[in-house]
Amino acid sequence: MLKITADELKTISQYIHDISGIYLDQSKSYLLETRLGPIAEELGCASFRALHDKAKRDSTKNIERRLIDAISTNETLFFRDNSPFELLKHKILPELIDLRSPASPRMKTHIKIWSSASSTGQELYSIAMTIRELLDGQLDRFNFKLLGTDISDSAVKQASYGKYNKFEIERGLPRQTLQKHFTLFGDSWKIKDEIRSMVNFRKLNLMLPFTGLGKFDIIFCRNVAIYFTLQDRKKLFNKLAASLADDGYLIIGSTESLTGICPLFVPKRHLRAIFYQKKN
Amino acid sequence: MNTLTILVVDDDPVIRRLLEQRLTKENHTVLLAEDGYKAEKIIETTPIDVILTDLMMPGEIGGIEVLEIAKNKNQQIEVILITAHSSVDTAVEAMKKGAADYLEKPLNFTELFLRLQKISNMLSLLRSAEDLRQAMDVTESTAGETIQNLEITAGELQEKLDAVEAILSNDTIEAYSRITSALNIIYK
């Protein structure tokens, strides 16, 4: 396997940080070697320096995309850590529906939800399934906009396709939910069109400005800021605050904290889960 | 090699006995069924890793149906179909329905053992991945609880601090009562 020198490690981690926001400290040489080494070899690069130079020179950005796909962690599963989805079902959605219901029964209730690091789509589909189960039969009174974004092209592609192999499916998904919302597709499972049509996925680098996204009622930003530096986390959560409705809800990963990172948010507890709202 | 629990489904008693002998010798646990109905009963009641089933059997339940029953019961059960050369097309159809593989008659045991080795390797990988996930879940939920408590405490302290700051900087109130109110907030 191609070895990385101390000097190359600095250059490559700086480059990865520039293109993705992902921060890799000096202890991550093994990760770079195993994940980026094969790409270097395939492109005929004799060193990581050569890979870096080639990626920077590539005006099509194809190499950059491949490096992001390789280095980003797509660890996810359906209903990962069940508590945010219970929170959504029993607290946030009922509250929001009360707040957003228009005076005229003929008008629809608009609710916008953003899964900001959607990986291969499991989180956003879990949100969609939760909504469908809560509002079964009355969905025509609502206009839900569910957006999933991720930095990895291939993750966005898989999410949009909504097809999962049996290992991805078996993790976290109860059998009953599986049979209700998926159809067997050879050896894989495909999310049903009624769920698929509720969501949209697109590529987004959280380090760049969020132009054209508008304001969301609920933002999920779980287990992504952990890969960023403290400084980048501060920037990210400040931007998320600006993209969240004043009475909106922010949900972060169960082991994450905003203390000392973003004073704009206050933590609130509901049963075993925590969510954040903007300080008024 | 890890040992597997294998269900052999075949209407031919000679093949059943032969497979039982060879697989038992390899340290696997072997269950036998002479038709699809018997197989279905075993699948419903016993945890199985692999099913070796004949594609063509008398009765309504053939190899394809056994495959469907197994996959419906548990996606993780791997099914290998045993087929005559003439029914290879059906076997390929079965692969699309989730069969792990098919073997042509007459059975080549070297080939069969290779397939089983692969399945066994994959099962042990799956199990260690499952163990790791379990360990991660426990760690994550314990850490999550601690962090959430800290987060709430930090939030409450910040709220107090803001209130104390507001009261102390309020010029319209006399200094002594500002301090008293501030202390009240702190010790509340």
Image (spheres, coloured by chain):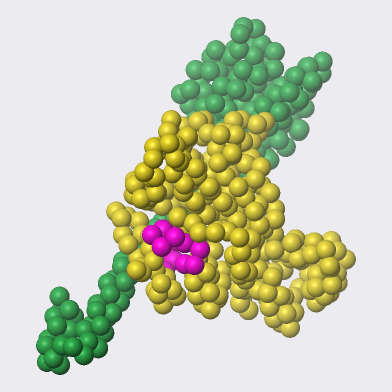
Chain colours: A yellow, B green
Q: From what the image shows, is residue A82 above or below residue B79?
A: below
Q: Residue at x 36, y 50 (%)?
A: A99
Image quadrant where residue A254 sits? bottom left
Q: Quadrant of the N terminus of chain B?
A: top right
Picture coordinates of residue A270, whole percent (x, y): 30, 55
Give how far across and how far down residue A126 sits, in percent. Answer: 50, 44
* Residues in magenta, as a range: A241-257
Inspect this view and state whether residue B2 appears: no
The spot of residue A67 in percent (x, y) is 73, 64
Q: Is residue A256 magenta?
A: yes
Taking the image as shown, residue A22 lies to the left or right of residue B144, namely right
- Residue drawn where x is 55% and y is 38% of the image: A195
Q: Can you name the residue that lies furthest to the top here?
A: B59
The residue at 66%/42% (across/down) is A161
Considering every residue shown, the one lying at the far right of the view is A44
Q: Is residue A127 magenta?
A: no
Q: Nearer the viewer, residue B21 or A248?
A: A248
Please tell me which residue is depicted at 84% across the width and 72% down the height of the picture: A57
Residue A26 showing in the rendered view: yes
